[in-house]
Image (cartoon, grey):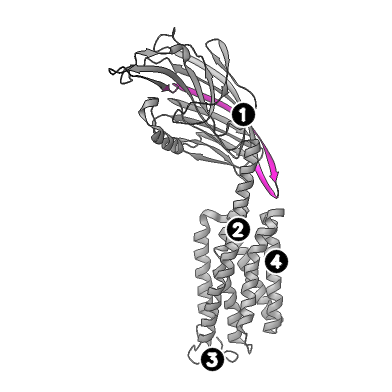
């Protein structure tokens, strides 16, 4: 039975299935290390400032409505600016938490724009009293703990300092506010300009909400690896080794929330959903995510194990050597350990060098073992060449990303064609390992 090619193929198939257990364990380790990295990012964000989303500013105007039953209800009208301009610079740094490096930034944002003094004739039921002298400006922030310096609002020739806390305006729940913006003497429909400078620390993500009829954002940073995402991509962008510059110009057509609403409309869920979909900005990514790359590499593990088994099996066919299933198992376990080495080493010296070390040591280990069990230098050299080709091709697949499926499919077809050519004259019914009729 052990010299039957069919039986050997069945044994190898069972071994490949059993090796899924350590591969799943390796996959779990990769996920666990990625979770620890995210925990380190969150911990750095707690101390430095988390991901920031700049929402607003929103003009909040208190008013009250009287009902026939004698009841009186207080509410707020919220109005977005007509134009909003944000000019920002984000200085970047890497903060270390344990073995993990987390990109952080210190952003200086010059924010200016124009509100139009509303008439509030759109509110139903119509308000019978409006506190124009108690209007306030609400600014949403993803993490107010990241505010570095107290900002001051330039409003109608004066300065009003921001204070902590913001109304639950629907678009955001936390942030800053500047109160006492008297606009009672401003005629309805009149433009009221505003400006302020916001200095804020954040971790990885800096995003903005399209909070005006037209929102224009320009941002520069020395970080060379930006990832632009969200509802709108930059109109112009320039990325170089010394940083990036990007400009957005976003209209209000597709943002999913109106230019004005009231606190009594119960639109919080709708507004929050629209905010999630409309935010845009940049993420400071690291060029090689070792856990994402390792996870992608593990997906090819079974295929690589099968192909390596195939090389050993072909030598069984064309030579007088007969391998034990445990020898196949040792080779399979060595290939599983490769992924563990890859993750553990890359956490300290980077993915590229870790891949070179892990693949080289694994290839040399299996090739040295092949020389002993196959009893021949030429046979071991063929195993060495096959593994070097496989690991080199895997590295290429990890780098190709968008073309990985195409390259993998073509390579698999060529390998299959090669095996079919080598075994084209083989008599599978009468073949006995160790004395087979060759090609």
The residue tagged with tag 3: helix, strand or loop? loop
Which dot marks residue 147?
A: 1
Q: How far across and how far down the image is residue 300, in percent?
A: 55, 65
164 shown above or below 46? above
The residue that mark 4 highlights is 360
Which dot marks residue 1?
A: 3
Q: Is residue 155 left or right of residue 359?
A: left
Mark 4 or mark 3: whose residue is earlier in sequence: 3
Mark 4 near mark 3, Cβ–Cβ under 8 Å? no
Mark 4 or mark 2: whose residue is earlier in sequence: 2
Mark 2 → mark 1, Cα distance in angstroms = 35 Å
Mark 4 → mark 2, Cα distance in angstroms = 21 Å
Q: Which residues are magenta?
A: 78-102
Q: How far across and how far down the image is residue 301, in percent?
A: 57, 67
Q: Is residue 287 visible?
A: no
Tell whether position 207 is magenta. no
358 shown above or below 401? below
Q: How far across and how far down the image is residue 324, in percent?
A: 62, 85
Mark 3 or mark 1: whose residue is earlier in sequence: 3
- Name the residue located 60 percent from the left edge and 82 percent from the top edge: 325
The residue that mark 2 highlights is 30
Mark 3 near mark 1, Cβ–Cβ under 8 Å? no
Mark 2 near mark 3, Cβ–Cβ under 8 Å? no
Mark 4 or mark 1: whose residue is earlier in sequence: 1
- Name the residue located 37 percent from the left edge and 13 percent from the top edge: 129
């Amino acid at each position: 039975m052990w010299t039957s090619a069919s039986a050997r193929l069945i044994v190898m198939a069972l071994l490949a299935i059993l090796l899924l257990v350590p591969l799943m364990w390796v996959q779990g380790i990769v996920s666990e290390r990625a979770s620890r990295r995210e925990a380190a990012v969150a911990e750095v964000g707690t101390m430095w400032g988390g991901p920031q989303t700049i929402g607003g500013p929103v003009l909040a105007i208190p008013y009250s409505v009287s009902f026939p039953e004698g009841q009186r209800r207080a509410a707020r009208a919220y109005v977005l600016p007509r134009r909003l301009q944000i000019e920002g610079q984000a200085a970047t740094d890497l903060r270390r938490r344990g073995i993990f490096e987390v990109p952080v930034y210190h952003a200086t944002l010059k924010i200016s724009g124009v509100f139009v003094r509303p008439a509030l004739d759109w509110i139903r039921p119509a308000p019978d009293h409006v506190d124009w002298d108690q209007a306030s400006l609400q600014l949403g922030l993803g993490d107010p703990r990241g505010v570095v310096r107290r900002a001051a609002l330039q409003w109608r020739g004066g300065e009003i300092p921001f204070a902590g806390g913001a109304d639950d305006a629907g678009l955001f729940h936390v942030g800053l506010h500047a109160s006492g913006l008297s606009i009672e003497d401003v005629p309805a429909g009149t433009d009221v300009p505003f400006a302020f400078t916001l200095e804020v620390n954040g971790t990885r993500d800096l995003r903005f909400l399209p909070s005006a009829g037209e929102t224009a954002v320009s941002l520069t940073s020395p970080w060379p690896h930006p990832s632009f995402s969200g509802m709108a991509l930059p109109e112009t962008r320039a990325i170089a080794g010394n940083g990036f510059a990007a400009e957005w110009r976003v209209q209000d057509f597709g943002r999913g929330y109106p230019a004005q609403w009231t606190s009594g409309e119960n639109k919080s869920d709708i507004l929050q959903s629209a905010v999630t979909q409309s935010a845009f900005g940049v993420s400071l990514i690291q060029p090689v995510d070792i856990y994402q790359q390792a996870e992608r590499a593990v997906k090819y593990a079974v295929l690589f194990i099968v192909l390596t088994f195939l090389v050993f099996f072909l030598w069984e066919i064309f030579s007088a050597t007969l391998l034990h299933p445990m020898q196949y198992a040792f080779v399979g376990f060595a290939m599983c350990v490769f992924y563990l080495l890859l993750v553990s080493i890359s956490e300290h010296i980077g993915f590229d060098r870790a891949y070179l070390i892990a693949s080289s040591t694994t290839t040399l280990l299996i090739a040295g073992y092949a020389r002993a069990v196959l009893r021949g230098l030429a046979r071991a050299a063929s195993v060495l060449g096959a593994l070097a080709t496989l690991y080199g091709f895997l590295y290429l697949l990890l780098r190709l990303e968008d073309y990985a499926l195409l390259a993998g499919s073509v390579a698999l077809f060529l390998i299959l064609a090669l095996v079919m050519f080598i075994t084209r004259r083989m008599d599978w019914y009468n073949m006995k390992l160790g004395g087979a009729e060759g090609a």
